[in-house]
Every structure is written in C-alpha cells, then in structure tokens.
Image (tube, rainbow, N blue to C red):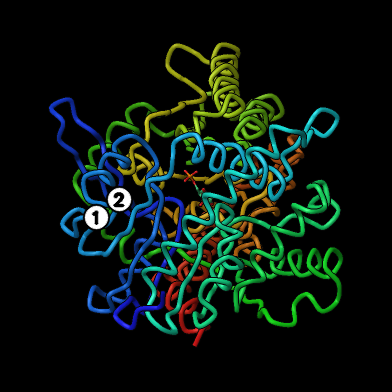
Amino acid sequence: MASTQGAQILVASNRGPVSYTLEEDGSLTARRGGGGLVSGLSAIGPDAGAVWVCAALGDGDREAVRRTGGTLDPADTGGQHVRMLGIAPDVYDDAYNGIANSVLWFVHHMLYQTPLEPAFGAEFRAQWASYEAYNRAFAEALADEAGQGAAVVVQDYHLVLVPGMLRELRPDLRIGHFSHTPWAPVDYFRMLPDDIAREVLRGILGADRAAFLTWRWANAFTTCCMELLGPDALADTRIGVHGLGADADFLRERSRQEDVEERIAVLRGQVGPGRKTIVRVDRTELSKNIVRGLLAFRQLLEDHPEWREQVVHIAMAYPSRQDLAVYRDYMAEVRRLTEEINEQYGTPGWTPVQLHLKDDFARSLAAYRIADVALVNPIRDGMNLVAKEVPVVSDEGCALVLSREAGAYEELGEDAITVNPYDVSGTAQALHEALTLPDGDRIERAKRLAASATSLPPTQWFLDQLHALD
Ligand code: G6P
C-alpha cells in the first residue's frame, strides 16, 4: 500500500531510458536511449528521487530484470531510478505488437485498409486481455513505488488503461496521461468495438489531466469522450496541451562534433559537387509516408527535367517494429522503389536516391546540416521532431516541406511549404518550390522555423506536465 517513503515523481512508459544486450559471455551491456522523455526527466535532477517504470523489451532486458529483481543499477541508467517490468514474452508481444502497434497506432494514424482490415475477432479479444494484463502490471508497480500524494505521468498509447487502474489502487495520487500520437477523429475511432472504445477512453479519464501535443488531437479526444460516453464524461479530467520542441542546445553542440564532420564529408562525396539535397530522416513507420515521398521525388524529375543530375534525395529510413510483417513489407517497398528510380534516372555519376537503412544518429545530423530541403510528409504524426530539428541544425538554412497532418504544422505551417501527404503531384511541386526559394527568403524562414521549433525544450515540456498536476 501507500508508503510515505515512496517516490514523489513517477514516469511510466513502455520503452525505458536503457536497454540491455545479453553478450555471448553471459554479461549484459547497457545502452542508454535518447528522446524527449530522457532529456525531459533530466530537468528535475537525481535528487528529486523520481522513479521511471518501464517494460523489459527483449531477452537482454528480461535477463537484467531476472538478475536485479527489476530495480536497475543506477550506474546503467545515468543515475536514474528505473524499475523494469519483466512481463511474460507472449503477453508482451500481444500487448505491444498486437494491440499497441497494430490496433491503437493504426486507429490514431488512420492506417487501416478498410475493405479488409480491421476485423476484430477472437484473436483481437485474446490480445486485448494481454494488453489489460500488461497495463495492470504497470499500475501495480506504480502503486507500489509511489509515495503519498505523488505525481505520476503516464506516457502514450501503450498505457491508456493505467490511469484508471491506478486511480482505483491509489486514489491519493495525482495522475497525468500524455499522448504522443495524434488522436483519431470520432468516426474513425468508432471502428473499435464499442466496449473497447469506451474502455480506452475511461482508462485515460482515470487521470486528473489528459494531455496532448496539439489542440487538434486534444479536441478529437474530447469529441470521442462526449459522443461515446456522454456530456459529463470530462467532469473529472482536465485537458491540456504541451507541444514538445527540439532540444536546441544539445543539437547544436552534438552536430558540431568530429564524427558528424566525418559523415558530412562522406555524404558530400556521395552527393557530388554543386548538387542540391532533399533530406528525410525517419524511422520506417507506415505513417511516415516514405513511399509517397519517393514517388513525389520521381515526379519532380519527370515534371522538371532541369533537376536531373542536379539534386539528390538522401533518405534515411531506419528499421522500426520489424516484428510486424506489414512493417517489413513497407521497408521492402521503400527499397524496391528506390532501386526502380535509380535505374530509371540514374547516370554513371549520379545516384538520384541515396537510401540509408542503418540507424546512425551522427549521420542523421550530418544530413540535417547539408540539407537544402527537408521533406517531412507523414500521413499523420503526433508532432514530428525531425521537422523541428533540421532547421535548427542546417548549415545554410534549409527549406521545409511539411505535411499539414503533422502536429508540427500548427507551429511551423507558416514558414514551411505545406503539403497534403496523399497528393504526390502536389508534393512534387512543393519540392520544386522549396528548391527554388530565393536564398534570402529561405534563410529568413529557416530562422523563424528554428525559433518556433525550440520554444518548448524537452525539459520545460516535462516540467509543464508535472506542474500542471499541482
Ligand atoms: C513513435 C511515437 C511515440 C512512441 C514511439 C514508440 O516515436 O511518436 O509516440 O512512443 O514511437 O516507438 P517504439 O519503437 O517503442 O515502438
């Protein structure tokens, strides 16, 4: 039950700040992750005694949990108190791959091919039971770690049931939920079976405060609540918005380091002298729309032959969620289309699309620095930090081609060249426009983009979530 000794600040997320690899000699290597939450939490410092509850993602993590009982060695976590949950692999697989990534992610990003999918049958129901069990494991661990009246910030679509479950276990806690994804419009959200749709909403409404990256997603959530649960649904839950921004200090410092300079030299060699670059950097998620980006680049070469031999599309498409066949197929299509374009248009001295599949942060930063144009065209995206990072880092002030369906559009739309992500011809035209922006205009826009992109650094974003629970 409630211990007065317990933590006063708790974070819960599926992916924690560290992951372990089990080496052949039986030792464990810890690798620390980056991202908004990690830098956000650093704002409160180790003395605050915050506890981060996360799941063991793979065999290395599960082994670390077995050896430590779940409370990780602070030497592995940069001093943070991390409690890692060793959830049974089949339960975890159902919850993470089955529900979180194949159902909730698909609903909020509107990715279903509706004549065939979804079909919510027995398999879905079994996976949902695992998702409940996985959420319950988090709720119980949080209830166990939290001191009287503590603040708990629960992150994302993996853990939508946690606030409601935790509220029942520990009515004294102040609970926030933060969604990093878009929220589906009500007509799309209603595809979920009614009981499940309501369970999702009620789960989040167990929080004192439900927060989102933009008002667009927050409003979609409130509409779902009102229509599915009735006009009083929001009586006990406040709604908030915190638009996570780029970490300017970190990016500027990191992108000037030696390994980035080395990669710039390599990339420049591959691009060739005098050519312009269109850069994209994504995890290969279905929502990132990499394929239509390639189609648009091909159409640019078709509609504007003057760009042949004059521009290179550098596409970083890093593997993501490769346990799911649909993600592997998507990755294969990105590869196939790249080859097709290069065969169709390439010349001995010019490879039009340069595709990079191996995740390398220093090389991503190198690409940001040499970008003339950044292409960020997701079908839907909670925010999209690449759109915010490139203008901060680019050496010459890049132009930004930005999907109007990215959360970042609300803040950056005015100075970006915006596109409908489904409109391939429109995107090709936007690329042409971006490539031909006069220098002065492009540089001024990039300055304004960088200023808005960094107005809410991760530390502030995290503190705002916490303070809003006071
Ligand atoms: C994207 C989303 C986040 C989400 C993350 C999970 O980055 O924007 O909302 O938490 O994916 O990714 P993972 O690799 O853990 O499945």
Q: Marks 1 and 2: in contact by CB < 8 Å? A: yes
Which SS class for mark 1?
Answer: loop
Instruction: Determine which residue is flagged by label 1.
Output: 72
**What label does residue 381 carry, if any?**
none
Q: Is residue 362 left or right of residue 411?
A: left
- The amino acid type, in three-letter code, at marker 2 is Val
Horizontal and vertical percent position of residue 314: 47, 33
Pick the residue in front: 282 or 448: 282
| Residue displayed at 74% across by 45% down | 110
Classify the position of the N terminus by image quarter: bottom left
- 31 relative to 209, above or below: above
Residue 216 position, x and y percent, is: 72, 65
Q: Label 2, label 1: how many angstroms apart (C-alpha)?
A: 9 Å
Q: Which residue is the extreme one toward the bottom?
A: 470
In the picture, measured across the screen, residue 88 lies left or right of residue 220, that is left
- State which tag comes first along the sequence, 2 or 1: 2
Q: Quadrant of residue 415?
A: bottom right
From this viewpoint, is residue 285 visible? yes
Foreground tag (2 vs 1): 1
Of the pair 3 and 381, the residue shown nearer to us? 3
| Residue type pointed to by label 1 | Leu
Q: Report the residue marked by disc 2.
A: 18
Q: What's the residue at 53%, 42% (across, down)?
A: 96
Measuring from the top left, give residue 159's x and y in whole percent: 55, 57
Pick the residue in front: 80 or 89.
89
Label 1, residues with CA under 10 Å away: few <14, some 14-19, many ≥20:
some
Identify the secondary structure beneath mark 2.
strand
The foreground one among 165 and 277 is: 165
One can see residue 316 in this view: no
Task: Classify residue 448 as left or right of residue 40.
Answer: right
